[in-house]
Image (cartoon, rainbow, N blue to C red):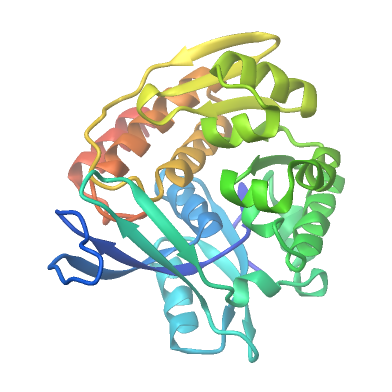
Amino acid sequence: MTDVAVELCVVGDFAWDVLIRTNSELLQGGDTFGEVALMPGGSGANVAVWAARCGIATHFVGKVGRDRMGQLAVENLEQEGVTSNLVESDSNATGSVAVFVDHTGERSMVSGHGADFYLLPSELPRATIAQAKHLHLTAWSFFTDPPRAAARAAARVAQDAGATLSFDPGSFQMIEEMGVEHFLDVTRDLGIDVFLPNKEEGAVLTGMKDPEDIARELDVLYPTALIVLKLDADGALVWQDGEAVHVPPATNKLVDATGAGDSFAGAFLAGRLRGRSAVDSAAFANQISAWVIEHPGARPEPGPALGRLIAASFPG
């Protein structure tokens, strides 16, 4: 519970990323030098941190192990200005993800099945969730149950209190593994207000390839939602009231794609919660995600350039 008014509540995963980055291709059975670093991550926690960095009063709800990495998770969120309810598990370790970034900047991930996958409805801080103006969920809380029941319960609590809801479908590979129809069955009844897929996720859900066709079909599947399609190097596409607006990218200087979508979501929600239009919010989110991909990790340490960017977008 927190005494600070909550603008955004995120229910989801906190995990530690073991980042492995090389400047050359790996040789099977061989050795190479590269960068190996432990960095805070988790799709839900990343969104919360980026929204907080953009000036939004943000609360995070998740589950960690009763271990040193769980303690570090609490400390990390405190340092980022994110208030939190982190349930401690005696049975499961704090989540971890192996993130391999190749010499082109593209990333591949192997996710462990940590404590973040075991959040239960009974462990939700319902009063805190009910205080929020907006709730954000990611599909990493929906691919298995638990934590699916907890995420769906959080959505009901927030909406009953008058909050809006956003959703990021997370991973096209995991949607395929779960099955598109099953995924739609457990997400279409949520009453989503903002749907934030990337192009690959949208293509899997709709069977379409062209961004406008994808957005049009997603509008049919999720009729209550503003569709914001993340297009990576091509920017973003906002579908609203039956019309598509392409929002150009801010840069193509890819160093590490880890966390680009999460930073986009956090920045986009910050813009919307500040009263910006969907298109303006997407343009700001493109700038933030462009800064992120120029640095290693999902949450690079903020520098002066990022501070100036945010200050220029939200003066005062």
| Residue 215 position (above or below residue 68) | above
Tell me residue 204's x, y (percent): 63, 35
Q: Residue furthest top?
A: 243
Tell me the quarter of the image containing the C terminus: top left
In this rendering, the count of numbered labels is: 0
Please state if 204 lies on the left or on the right of 315 as rendered: right
Tell me residue 255's x, y (percent): 23, 44
Tell me the quarter of the image containing the N terminus: bottom right
| Residue 73 position (above or below residue 314) | below
State the image quarter where residue 108 is shown.
bottom left
Residue in the picture at 62% in, 60% down: 12
Please state if 163 lies on the left or on the right of 136 as rendered: right
Residue in the picture at 54% in, 34% down: 200
Tell me residue 312's x, y (percent): 30, 29
State the image quarter where residue 63 is shown.
bottom right
Tell me residue 251's x, y (percent): 26, 27
Res 311 seen here:
yes
Please state if 311 lies on the left or on the right of 186 as rendered: left
Q: Nearer the viewer, residue 161 or 278?
A: 278
Q: Nearer the viewer, residue 104 or 91?
A: 104
Residue in the picture at 23% in, 43% down: 104
